[in-house]
Image (cartoon, rainbow, N blue to C red):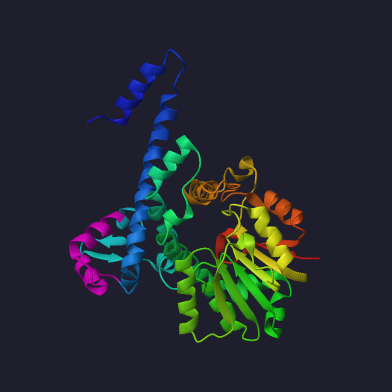
Amino acid sequence: MTTTEDLLAGSSRTTEAVTTIDEAAAEAFAERLFGEYTSGMVTLMIDIGHRTGLFDAAAAGPATSAELADRAGLTERYVREWLGAITTADITTYDPLTRTYTLPPEHAVCLTGGGSTNVAPVSLIVGHLANHIDEVVTAFREGGGVPYEKFRPGFTDVMDSMSRGVFDGQLVDGILPLAGDLPDRLRSGIRAADIGCGTGHALTVLATAFPASTFVGYDIATDAIERARAEAADAGLTNVTFEVCDVAKLPADARFDAVFAFDAIHDQADPEGVLRAVHDALSPGGIFAMLDIKASSHLENNVGNPVAPLLYGVSTLHCMTVSLALGGAGLGTVWGEELARQLLTDAGFEVVSVSDVPDDPVDVLYHCRRP
C-alpha cells in the first residue's frame, strides 16, 4: 500500500529542481486534506440521519443498532454501518459491553427538534449541490452558469428545511425586534411583502402572529408558490397571498409599508434592479428588512471565518452560477456588508442598522428605511 511518505517522497523528487519542499509541512497538509474529505463524508451521514429520523430515534435514549433501527423503522444493517460513521466522528458514543449507542443531549439539541437550534438540515445543501458539479465545471470552462431551474424542485425542499426552524424559533421574537418599530407596525396593521419567499413559511408565521396586517409573497418558482399557498390554506389564513413573480419586476401598483427579503438578494440576476423595485414599492418611511449573509466584501477579512469556506462553496455551486446563467451580476453568497451597504444606499435606502441574528451565525439583518 502506498503511504503518505511515499507520495511525498515522489513529489519531492519531481519538484526538487524547482523548489525545496518542507516535507513535514506537506505531510501535515495531506493529513488535513484527508480530514476535509472525512468531514465531507460525515456531512452526508448527518444528511441521512436527519432525513431518516435516526437522530430523533437516538435522542430517545441509548439503544443497540437493532433497537435504533426498530425505533426509526429502518433496516438494521444500514443503521449499524451509519452508526459506525457517526460514532467514529464523535457524534454518538458506543459501549462495547452492551453494544449500545448514545447521542449526548448536547449533540441532540443541535441535531433534533423543529426549532432554530437544530442545524442538521444545513447538511442537505451539500448533497444537493454536489449533484450539479459536472454542470458547474462546464461553466468554469465555457462561462455562463447553471440555471436556477436545474436545481429545482430539490433546492426548494432544501431551503425550506434549512430555514423553517429559524422562522419558527426566531422570526417573531428574535429577528423582527432588530428592525426597530416594525413589530408594533405589524400589530397595528400594515401591508407587507416577502420577495423571493420560497415556500412562504416566513409569511405563514407572520400572518399568524399579526392578523391585523396583510401579506403577499413573491417568488419565481411555481413549485414553491404552490406549496406556499397550500400551507397558508391548511392554516386557514386569509391575510396572506402568494404570486409567481420576478421580483425585479414587481407589479406597478405594488405598495407596501414593509418588505422582507430572506437570503434572496445575493443570487439575483439584477440585484440593483431588485433593490430599486423594493424601494419604489415602499411607502415613504417604509421598512426593508433584509436578512442576508454575515461576511465582508473583502476576502482578506473573511480569512479565519470558520464558515467562510462553506459560504464561498455554496456560492460557487449555486448562488453565483444561477445569476451568471442569466447574464447577471453574479454577486455570489459572500457579497458582503460593504457592498450590501453601497447597493442599498444607491437604491435610495437609509441603512439604519446591521445586526446579528439569534441562533443564526451565518446571517445578519439589515434594517433599512425609505426616507
Work out whether residue 143 or residue 298 is closer to the camera in this orientation and state it. Answer: 143
Q: Position of residue 349 (x, y in %)?
A: 76, 60
Rendered view: 204 above or below 219: below
Describe residue 212's horizontal placement relative to residue 34 as left or right: right
Q: Position of residue 269 (x, y in %)?
A: 58, 52
Residue that appears at 58% across and 60% down: 264
Q: Position of residue 182 (x, y in %)?
A: 70, 75
On whether residue 289 falls in the magenta region, the answer is no
For this orientation, the residue located farthest to the front is 252
Q: Is residue 307 visible?
A: no
Q: Position of residue 156 (x, y in %)?
A: 45, 63
On whether residue 80 falls in the magenta region, the answer is yes
Residue that appears at 49% across and 64% down: 221
* Dominant SS in magenta: helix
Work out whether residue 220 or residue 104 is closer to the camera in this orientation and state it. Answer: 220
Q: Is residue 67 visible?
A: yes
Rendered view: 113 above or below 44: below
Query: Considering the image in quadrants, where does the C terminus appear?
Result: bottom right
Image quadrant in which you'd find residue 121: bottom left
Q: Which residues are magenta?
A: 62-85
- Total marks shown come to 0
Describe residue 103's horizontal placement relative to residue 77 as left or right: right
Work out whether residue 154 or residue 39 is closer to the camera in this orientation and state it. Answer: 154
Work out whether residue 264 or residue 49 is closer to the camera in this orientation and state it. Answer: 264
